[in-house]
Image: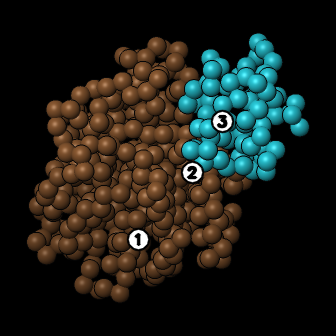
Chain colours: A brown, B cyan
Amino acid sequence: MAFLTFENVGITAMAAAVPRTVIDNYKYTQYFPEEQVKEVVDKVGIYERRFADGHTCSSDLCHAAAEKLFADNDIDRSEVDLLIFISQTPDYRMPATSVILQDRLKLPNSTIAFDINLGCSAFIYGLSVAYSMMSGQPALRKALILDGETRSKVYSPKDRRTAFLFGDGGVAALLERDERFGKSFFSLNSDGSREGLIKIDAGGYRNMSSAETVKEKVVDEYGNIRSDEQGYMHGGDVFNFVIREIPKDIKNLCVRTGEDIQSMDYYVFHQANNFINSYIAKKMKLDTAKIPSTIAKYGNTSSVSVPLTIVSELKNELIDKKKLLLSAFGVGMTWATAIVNFDNCQISDIIEI
Amino acid sequence: MEQKFLDLLKEILEIEDRELLMTDNFREYPEWDSLAYLSVIAMLDEEYGIQIEGSEFKKLKTVGDLFSVVTKK
């Protein structure tokens, strides 16, 4: 584990936006029989998801969330010196979406803007980058992390291994320096030998987009169908990886920092599916009352799932000082654990667009 | 130990109408699918503290092969 520690930086406000279109997973039976769908849905515990329409991008969800955050907290836009956009579903291959958002949000040209493309663990990675840049740099007054994904556009509805899992959402988080936040700790990890566990094979520069790569094909003995430009996932192997690495990383971070794992106020896990999260909670003997969940209503929103769960489930819980353990894992593979304090964090109501 | 293993496997695969044999090819069970795979991985970890690589698991064909993973530990 790469171990990082920071002092006196924290999240002071959050907001989120989700698409208004609700997918009822039990009724998502266009390509598979109802009984089969029910079995999958019950096992993964994902009952509803939000799907963006053809015109709505991750950036649009983040833009709406950021405008809400600015309005609710009366933020002076000229004080936002850093903008990080986190996504694997950006507007274009270039330019970086963060830069487009700088203009759309009417932030000054002196704003530092760049993208982070990483996947499910990216919010924690992005936090560490923002905390790091904010530390000891008084010239950076406020940082804005925008984290959005439209994973509904990534996976084939005809591949039952991924058809029922993913949803869309966007989050805005404002970061500032203040002594009330105290120390924060991060463990960040990577294992590229497992690049094939979750992947889109074509459409980048290794296998460039062509007529062949957009053709739908039967990809396995179960008759699942997708193109090479749609994502796939070996869920069993991911699960295997997760139950081996995630509890270990959480324990290691607690040992390294001297924190008692049972003393956390909340544990916010990446919302991959309920089967994985219930298993981790049981294995680590965590108090499930302290594990907020949005799996049932938003599904797996990739990097957005950790902050979206905070906005959705902890809206009134982070006014007093609270210690949160954040944990996420996914495509890469990459995985990350953080222990961060929240204190007087202003969380807006989730908006639908 | 063998009987306990067979009982556990039967339970997680939700097989009620027959007994399992060590010589069965579990991948040919009508109950076998990617969700069953998750359950087996969880069972191996929870009951036996065993985490098996996906590439290793692919080589296992019979219930006996699965059981040998447990006894080898």
Position of residue A2 in the picture relative to residue A10 (left or right):
right
At horizontal 37% and vertical 45% (from top left) the residue drawn is A199
- Looking at the image, which residue is at 65% across and 65% down? A251
The x and y percentages for residue A157 are 35, 26
Q: Position of residue A235 (x, y in %)?
A: 51, 39
User: Looking at the image, which residue is at 36% across and 65% down?
Assistant: A126
Numbered disc 1: secondary structure: helix
Residue located beneath label 2 in the image: A241
**Contact, mark 3 vs mark 2 (Cβ under 8 Å):** no
User: Image quadrant for the C terminus of chain A?
Assistant: top left
A34 displayed left or right of A117:
right
Residue beneath label 3, please?
B60
Name the foreground residue: A316 vs A176: A176
Q: Quadrant of the N terminus of chain A?
A: bottom right
Disc 2 vs disc 1: which is toward the camera?
A: 2
**Distance of mark 3 from mark 1, alpha carbons?**
41 Å
Closer to the N terminus: mark 2 or mark 1? 1
Real-space Cα separation, disc 2 to disc 1, in angstroms: 23 Å
Instruction: Give the number of the disc on residue A128.
Output: 1
Same-chain status of marks 3 and 1: no
Say left or right for A54 vs B15. Answer: left
Image coords of residue A250 (percent x, y): 60, 63
